[in-house]
Image (spheres, rainbow, N blue to C red):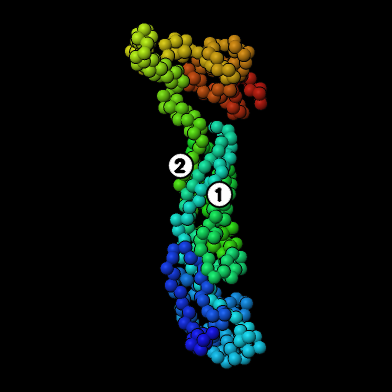
Amino acid sequence: MGLFSFIKSQLIEVIEWLDNSNDTMVYRFPVQNQEIKMGAQLTVRESQMAVFVNEGVIADVFTPGRYTLTTENMPVLTKIKSWKYGFNSPFKAEIYFVNTKQFSNQKWGTSNPIMMRDQDFGVIRLRGYGIYSFKVSNPVIFLKEIFGTNGSFTTDKITEHLKRMIVSGVSDAIAESRIPALDLAMNYDELSLAAKNKFQSKFNEMGFELSSFYIENLSLPEEVEKAMDKRTSIEALGNLNKYTQYQAAEAMRDAAQNEGNPFASAGVGFGAGNIMGQMMGASMGNPNNINQNPQANNNNNINCPKCNASLNNNAKFCTECGTTIGSSKKTNCISCKALIDETTKFCPECGSKQQKQCPNCNVEITGNTKICPECGTKV
């Protein structure tokens, strides 16, 4: 070591860091032999924190501001006293600058499909991707658990681990939400929030804070998407009969456009015209698609409560399944003598109240009772 270099190494340091990159998380200030001198001046800027390690132990964490450091390294004197150590001071002191800004636009994605059990399509495979942002919230935990004594630490050294942890959390959040595959797209915000809350504690264990998390897309296998499209088409058309007619008309149109077989084209065209004519005639003859079965529009019919078969209003038993119909007892209205259920309080024919009072004890009497059950008076 030359005389000039020795003199320069014994000057009191002015310690600061200006970050010229977008991905540096930790930077150790370069001091020769890690011998920061007594009275060194430390400047910490906004979006930074400084961890002071003195003699191998974290001595302090400095927030933005200017500080004077206290160490055992006295300029020149300590160096001379360290002759027995080869002029290497045993009093080591280091400053680690920790970047506390948000590291945004970090990407995550599924390398392997997420297996999911769906109520409509059974077991399906999902793939997804999105972005997230995080920052260092606890420099001490970050130093102890992640970067150790590295001279510098960048985001690419931790993002792969974070991405795998995020994918695991997203898989759990989707499974626990039980949202059908058809409704996933309209619940991205809810799933993103649930996933963020799920693995926030894991970020805290490394000294990080998960600032934001977004699911941009969850995609299904191609065959499942085709099945979803077909199901949507059927529901849009209203019923299966119309969908079948539509499919037949489409097939006949494609066949009619086949120029390689004029006879088949003529035959198919004739058949298509015939079928389409029947369909149009049926639509014009019954424009409102009203069921023309007179038995279905008969107001005197009732339906079986079990098999829904159409029955006569006076039927006692279902002719299809044998279920008893109208099992309640019948009685006559006290006014118009119409046949009504025994439990009816007002006659559906004349509106008369079906309860009378005993003229002697004023007890309410239902039905066609002639004698009061309480006092025996004739009603």
* 34 to 111, vertically: above or below: below
- Tell me if residue 362 comes above or below residue 252 in the rendering: below
Mark sitting on residue 75? none
Q: What element carries label 2?
A: helix
Residue at left offset 57%, top offset 56%: 161
Examine the image and state in which quarter residue 38 appears. bottom right
In the rendered structure, the answer to whether residue 165 lies left or right of residue 256 reads right
Q: Where is residue 333 in the image (x, y as percent from the top left)?
A: 53, 17
Residue 305 is situated, as x and y percent measured from the top left of the image, at 57, 19
- The disc placed on residue 186 is 2
Query: Label 2 amino acid?
Result: Met
Of 70 and 236, the residue lying toward us: 70
SS state under label 1: helix
- Which residue shows up at 57% across the image and 52% down it? 164
Q: Can residue 316 be seen in this view?
A: no
Q: What residue type is labelled 1?
A: Val
Q: Are marks 1 and 2 in contact (CB under 8 Å)?
A: no
Residue shown at 59%/70% (left/top)? Answer: 149
Per the image, the residue denoted by label 1 is 167
Q: Where is residue 55 in the image (x, y as percent from the top left)?
A: 62, 80
Q: Quadrant of residue 73?
A: bottom right
Residue 364 in the image: above or below residue 310: below
In x, y percent, where is residue 294?
Answer: 44, 9
* Quadrant containing the C terminus in the rendered view: top right
Q: Residues under labels 1 and 2: Cα distance? A: 20 Å
Check disc 1: other Cα within 10 Å, few if <14, some if 14-19, many if 20+.
many
Which is nearer the eye, 48 or 355?
Answer: 48
- Whether 239 is drawn above or below 281: the answer is below
Residue at point 51%, 76% (across, down): 30
Tell whether 52 sits left or right of 189. right
Q: Choose between 248 and 367: the one closer to the eye.
A: 248
Q: How many marks?
A: 2
